[in-house]
Amino acid sequence: MISKEKKEVKFKGKKPFKKKIKGNIFEKKILKKIYISRDKEYILSLYERDKEGNYILKKESFTKEEMKKIKSIADAVNKNSGGIFDFTKVGLLLVIVAGIIIFSVLFKNRLLTMALKSGLEAIFNAKAEVQGLNFELLNAKISIRHLEVANADAPMKNLFELDKTEIHLNSEQLLYGKFIAKNIECQGIRWNTDRKTSGALPGGKKPSDKKSATEEKKESKPLLDIGKIDVNKLIADNKTNIKSMALISNANLEITSLTNKWDDNLKNSKKRIDEVSKGVEEIKKIDVNSIKTLEQAQQALNKINTYVPAVDGLKKDIEKMGKDFSADKQKVESLKKNIQGSIEGDYKFFQSLLKLPKGGVKGIAISLAQDILAKKLGNIYYYALKALEYSNKLKDDKPVKKEEKKQEPVRSRGRNIYFPTKVYPRFLIQNFAASIGRKNENFYLDAYLRDVSSDPDLWKKPTTFHLGHINYGEELILNGKIDSRTKTKEPLVLEFQANNFPLEIQDSLGFLNIKYFKARYRFRTAFSLSKDLGTRGTAIINFKDIKMEVMNKEEIVSKIIYEAITDAPNVVLEINYLIEPDGKVIIDGKSNIDKLIAGKVGKILDQYAKKYEKQLKDYLSKQINEELKKNETLAKAFNGLEDLSKGNLKDADALKKLLEEKKKEINDKIKSETESKLKEATKNIKLPKF
Amino acid sequence: MNIVKWIINLIKVLNSNQAPGQVAGGIAFAFMLALIPANNLLWIVLFIFTFFLKIHNGIESLFLILFKLITFLFDPLLDSIGYSVLTFPSLYNFFTKLANVPLMPFSRFNNTIVMGGLVLGVVLWCPIYILFLWLIKLYRNKLKTAIENSRLVKGFLRLPLISFIVKLVSKVSSLSSTSAR
């Protein structure tokens, strides 16, 4: 057992221990790296120095235990030598980093291209081609230069094709849970384009002959036709909107009730006057000249005084009644005024329904522009308001402070010192762009949306957008700005242009004797929305390539209009419009052909207008006349009561006056009698002499 | 049991041929990491960085835990140091630029405790390194033999639990020098 343990093994060398080591290397690189003095002594005991100063291993074989010890010391020496970095770990890290770089440079995009291609092919069952795919993980960006997918039903056609497509997010802000899209772009969207090679997949399904073609029948609203207005029907359809009828009926009821009330009151009052008058008759009979003594005078005065309170009370009551009556009379007058106002209002309402184009040529301009404005501007305004609404919805609500769980930290949290940094909102799309088709093609659409943010105040930029659309020469351009910032003055600014659009009006310009009107038009407008959500603006419409036919070329109005419009190289309309918050467009305008036809056509139109207005007035008057008459009779009856009221007051005054006169006469009598008695008395008195 | 392992590890390292600089470096880094609060990118980066250095990571982890137990006492000092550094006018532009560097906000360098911990950790790194280097050398050259030969230690080592630990240490460590003799 002992001989087995002591069996020696030949030493083959273990770095840094070799059979022969140079003196300086042994001392600097080996002995200095051994920190246990016993180990140092042990290693020194294994070597001996030659004449040249080299260290030579004393023996060539060692026991297993000795070998184990040498190996452990050798490991420690190796560990302790070298720089401050652990190059094994650094090397491993470098290998991993290099691997990632090599993978991302050489294979990442290829693998993703293959994955996308096979995914698209599996979905659409046709060949897909992906070119220029670039994925940057750290930059959170993926872009494709070109992508096309064939149509499985028509292999020589593409189902769709995309040019530059890119999604680029802010990777750093993603870590904060914020969605910041620097760019979302999809250019050159096309479909049904030709392919040079078949797009069918080997073993794919056979193409079908499905055709999908749906055409919507366009309905155009007839424009104003002044020759076909049915006034009676117009009033019958809107009978519920006639306010004056109900107002007159209510007023009549009130006047009747007031008349009855005052009739009773005044009759009762008259009755009281008559009763008091009977008593007062006795006073009338008193002959002051027949009164001889003071006692008789005093008796007459007492008699008069007994009637004074009754007459005073009566007078007061009648005066109060008179005041109340005047108040009710004013009420009746105001009811009458309201009725008049209401009748005027009803008339204006029906007049507005007629939309009579007063002023001749203005009617032409508005009629021509109405269709364009109602369709284009109304829709744009509606969608712009929707966009404004969504933009406001997108805004962050005021942050609600979450109640943090109170934990007593062992360590202090310290203080945060803030430095100015670019702070992003929770949600932001800096650029979203897309285009369908290519420029110079018959069909092209391009659009962008920029700076859509959940906190526009923080981002300090309004949302801007653009839409451009070309469809076989017809061009539509819409540029806008939606500003949801708190201190904004203009929440919405829009510029709209429609070029080369066709306009065709048939059978609806009959009042101008125009059979049909055809032209191409250019429409330009710009407006901004104020905070009360109403807007005014001006639009310019140019008509060109005008083709029209009048009903009768010999007729004077037709001739004037035909010549004015066809002779002008361009008909330009300037339209002032008001868009109400509900999207209703109210317009007014003028054109460059006004001067030519204004006077003559205007007169005719005014005649029509007057005719219908008279018709309307007559019909309305007839409808409310009966009630109105009743109202007048009642009002007259009520006013008649006023005479009765005044008569009562007069009677009361007469009674009072009578009593006062009699009272005065008797008082005068008493006075004169007293004076004569006094004189007599003084004569008989003898005064003492001094 | 973990504490026993750590003690064994510490004794093993102190008695092994491990370079004193590597051990002292591990302790100096542990002190720096203990001063900086751990919930930020700076701490994580520093901690990972030390794994690529030739320092004793076991000792570093052990001392990190030990220092963590007392570093809260330094917080008022760290707060005032951090505040002074972060509000130092000449450094304002530098910190503003730093705040705008991607990912830098995750380092929470703008926190007074983090900045104070970093600054004090860097400043005290050398003194702590030198101190522990001297202590290790002192232990290995002088104290170790004196401790081993003292009667108190010999008596202490005879205690059943301690003799068990010593056996355990001899088993796992490479204190071959004593066993070989």
Image: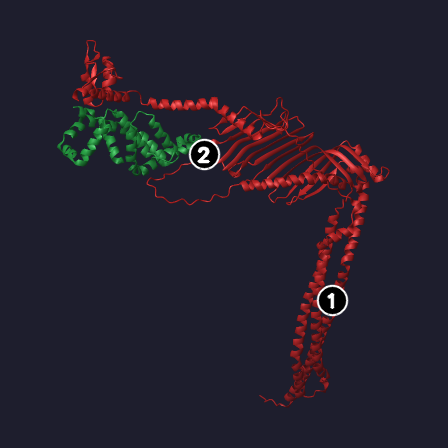
Chain colours: A red, B green
Mark 2 residue element: helix
Can residue A486 be seen here? no
Q: Tell me residue A677's x, y (percent).
A: 66, 87
Apparent side of residue A218 relative to residue B25 in the rendered image (left or right): right
Q: Which residue is identified by label 2?
A: A175
Q: Tell me residue A680's x, y (percent).
A: 66, 88
Q: Tell me residue A521's x, y (percent).
A: 72, 34
Q: Which residue is identified by label 1?
A: A639
Q: Nearer the viewer, residue A333 or A317?
A: A333
Q: Is residue A341 above or below residue A73?
A: below
Q: Nearer the viewer, residue A489 or A151?
A: A151
Of labels 1 and 2, earlier in sequence is 2
Q: Nearer the viewer, residue A142 or A352?
A: A142
* Chain of the residue that carries numbered disc 1 in the rendered image: A
The part of the image, by quadrant, that contains residue A314 is: bottom right
In the rendered image, the quadrant that contains the C terminus of chain A is: bottom right
The part of the image, by quadrant, that contains residue A491 is: top right
Local crowd size for mark 2, using a 10 Å CA cut-off: few (<14), some (14–19), many (≥20):
few
The part of the image, by quadrant, that contains residue A97 is: top left
Which amino acid, mark 2? Leu
Mark 1 residue element: helix
Local crowd size for mark 1, using a 10 Å CA cut-off: few (<14), some (14–19), many (≥20):
some
Which amino acid, mark 1? Asn
In the rendered image, the quadrant that contains the N terminus of chain A is: top left
Q: Nearer the viewer, residue B40 or B105?
A: B40
Can residue B80 be seen here? yes
